[in-house]
Image (cartoon, helix red, strand yellow):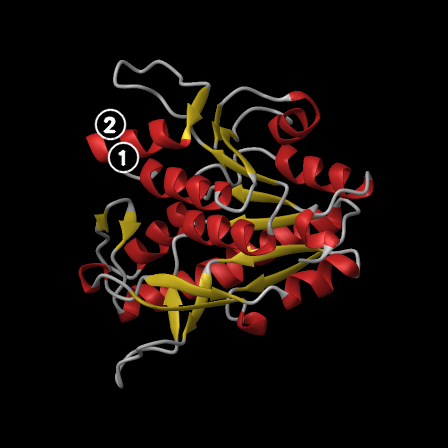
């Protein structure tokens, strides 16, 4: 693996925190100017739901992932690879950073297959092709990635050519593929809590797995924990922190910012 990929910091920005503040973008620009190699994966679930409502398309979730039929896939692609992605890229560039927006389709970055058909056209990642990330990082850009990827394996004849991937899953798989130094999730909660609501500042791999197995972790936290475990498998330091707090990303990288750290 190339040095620039293994030294990269992968940041997953949750859709629930987008637009509520601008310090994450400021932090990304500051870190880039300080010489850090950054890869950003973003969600956009809240905005997808809003646009689905405008189209009178109902939304349902299974295990924290949006059930995706063809109309939902069309809206998700337009919102994620269009509106959300370009807003983030424009914000980074507008503050003097250098960013390029792509999706998992570009350069065949994310190749996958349909997983559980109960979830519809939600992808399972089979392969990550990292060359486009290496090219962008080497050229001095922050790749900003929307989680729409290629339907490349075991594709039924009537299936679409693209799939909707959970952004947390994509973040974990890319972190593992490039061997990123760190994997940081910015979300709308302080971290992972126990059943009494108390923040768990540190978890081992086994403890994190047990939270999922026991049902103590639920909803959208399940794919985040699983993604952290995927990142751990390649040696990434992983954490889940509160993206609503001012300059939390900068603080996490420079001195640690609380939240929950999952370690091997």
Residue density around tag 1, few if under 14, some if 14–19, many if 20 or more, within 10 Å: some
Task: Assign the N terminus to one quadrant of the image.
Answer: bottom right
Q: Residues within 10 Å of mark 2 (few under 14, many from 20)?
A: some
Please provide percent x and percent y for residue 169.
Answer: 42, 51
Q: Which mark is residue 212?
A: 1
Q: Can you give x and y, in whole percent of width and height, for residue 178 in the image?
A: 60, 54
Report the front residue among 58 and 148: 148
Does 244 sit above or below residue 129? above
Instruction: Pinpoint residue 57: horizontal percent, then vertical percent.
Output: 24, 60
Q: Secondary structure at mark 2?
A: loop
Residue 217 is at least partly visible in this image: no
Q: Residue at x 48, y 48 (%)?
A: 172
Q: Which quadrant of the view contains residue 136?
A: bottom right
Instruction: Write the residue at 40% across / 18% down.
Output: 200
User: Quadrant of residue 158 in the image?
Assistant: bottom left
Q: Is residue 32 visible?
A: yes
Q: What residue sits right under mark 2 in the picture? A: 216
Q: Is residue 246 above or below residue 119?
A: above
How far apart marks 2 and 1 lie (CA) works out to 6 Å
In front: 201, or 118?
A: 201
Q: Position of residue 47 (x, y in %)?
A: 41, 49
Q: Quadrant of residue 32?
A: top right
Toward the viewer: 223 or 46? 223
Q: Secondary structure at mark 1?
A: helix
Q: Residue at x 53, y 31 (%)?
A: 243
Q: Residue furthest bottom?
A: 157
Relative to 148, say whether 254 is above or below. Answer: above
Question: Is disc 2 in contact with disc 1, using a CB cutoff of under 8 Å?
Answer: yes
**Residue name at image x 74 percent, y 38 percent:** 31
């Amino acid at each position: 693996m190339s040095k620039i990929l293994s030294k990269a910091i992968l940041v997953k920005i949750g859709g629930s925190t987008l637009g509520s503040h601008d310090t994450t973008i400021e932090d990304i620009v500051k870190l880039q100017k300080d010489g850090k190699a950054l890869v950003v994966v973003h969600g956009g679930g809240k905005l997808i739901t809003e646009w689905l409502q405008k189209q009178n398309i109902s939304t349902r979730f299974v295990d924290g992932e949006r059930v995706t039929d063809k109309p939902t896939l069309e809206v998700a692609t337009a919102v994620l690879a269009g509106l959300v992605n370009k807003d983030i890229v424009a914000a980074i560039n507008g503050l003097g950073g250098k960013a390029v927006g792509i999706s998992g389709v570009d350069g065949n970055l994310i190749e996958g297959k349909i997983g559980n058909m109960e979830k519809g056209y939600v992808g399972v990642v089979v392969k990550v092709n990292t060359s486009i990330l290496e090219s962008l990082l080497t050229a001095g850009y922050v790749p900003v990635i929307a989680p729409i990827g290629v339907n490349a394996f075991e594709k039924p004849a009537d299936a679409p050519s693209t799939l909707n991937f959970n952004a947390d899953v994509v973040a974990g798989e890319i972190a593992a593929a490039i061997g990123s130094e760190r994997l940081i999730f910015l979300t709308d909660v302080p971290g992972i809590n126990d059943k009494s609501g108390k923040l768990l500042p540190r978890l081992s791999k086994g403890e994190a797995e047990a939270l999922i197995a026991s049902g103590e972790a639920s909803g959208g936290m399940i794919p985040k924990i699983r993604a952290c475990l995927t990142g751990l498998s390649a040696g990434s330091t992983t954490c889940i922190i509160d993206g609503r707090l001012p300059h939390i990303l900068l603080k996490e990288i420079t001195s640690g910012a609380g939240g929950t750290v999952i370690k091997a």
